[in-house]
């Protein structure tokens, strides 16, 4: 029972970090869109702003890595291997969703 509660808390915290990343990347894309002049020729500032969403994702991935280790330590596991597996699984899934999913959904343009 306590194990299930702690697992739900840690997975919820990881999900919250991914949701925060979504809004950070979305905001950075909105800022880039406001600065872009729309004439097709990108200035140096707009080119720099194009890197900001990727930098945001990289920073959040680093935070997810640290969070998965810290949160995995708080969970109850019977063996060290089980704990390491839990941390690696959290880290892998969260980074895949953060890298691919967030960029995909912030760049999607419904028709």
Image (cartoon, helix red, strand yellow):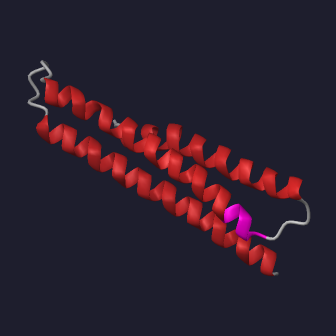
- The one nearer the camera, 104 or 57, is 57
Establish if 82 lies above or below 49.
Answer: below
The answer to whether residue 108 of the structure is visible from this angle is no
Q: In the image, is residue 8 part of the stretch drawn in magenta?
A: no
Residue at the spot x=79%, y=81% of the render?
Answer: 2
Q: Is residue 70 left or right of residue 55?
A: right
Establish if 89 lies above or below 77.
Answer: above
Q: Is residue 92 left or right of residue 85?
A: left
Instruction: Name the image quarter holding the C terminus.
Output: top left
As drawn, the residue found furthest toward the bottom would be 1
- Percent across and percent down for residue 40 are 13, 19
State which region is magenta. 71-75
The answer to whether residue 48 of the structure is visible from this angle is yes
Instruction: Name the image quarter holding the N terminus.
Output: bottom right
Q: Is residue 101 left or right of residue 38?
A: right
Displayed quadrant of residue 110: top left
Residue at the spot x=58%, y=44% of the render?
Answer: 95
Displayed quadrant of residue 76: bottom right
Residue at the spot x=28%, y=50% of the render?
Answer: 27
Establish if 77 lies above or below 91.
Answer: below
Q: In the image, is residue 74 part of the stretch drawn in magenta?
A: yes
Per the picture, the main secondary structure of the magenta-coloured stretch is helix
- Percent across and percent down for residue 66 are 59, 54
- Percent across and percent down for residue 77 are 85, 66
Residue at the spot x=51%, y=63% of the render?
Answer: 16
- Percent across and percent down for residue 85 are 80, 50
Numbered circles on residues, count: 0
As drawn, the residue found furthest toward the right would be 79
């Amino acid at each position: 029972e306590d194990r299930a509660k702690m697992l739900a808390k840690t997975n919820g915290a990881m999900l919250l970090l991914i949701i925060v990343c979504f809004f950070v990347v979305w905001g950075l894309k909105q800022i880039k869109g406001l600065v872009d002049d729309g004439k097709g020729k990108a200035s140096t500032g707009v080119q720099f702003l194009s890197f900001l969403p990727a930098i945001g994702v990289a920073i959040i991935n680093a935070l997810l890595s640290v969070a998965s280790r810290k949160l995995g330590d708080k969970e109850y596991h019977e063996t060290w291997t089980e704990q390491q597996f839990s941390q690696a699984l959290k880290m892998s899934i969260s980074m895949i969703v953060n890298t691919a999913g967030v960029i995909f959904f912030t760049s999607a343009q419904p028709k």
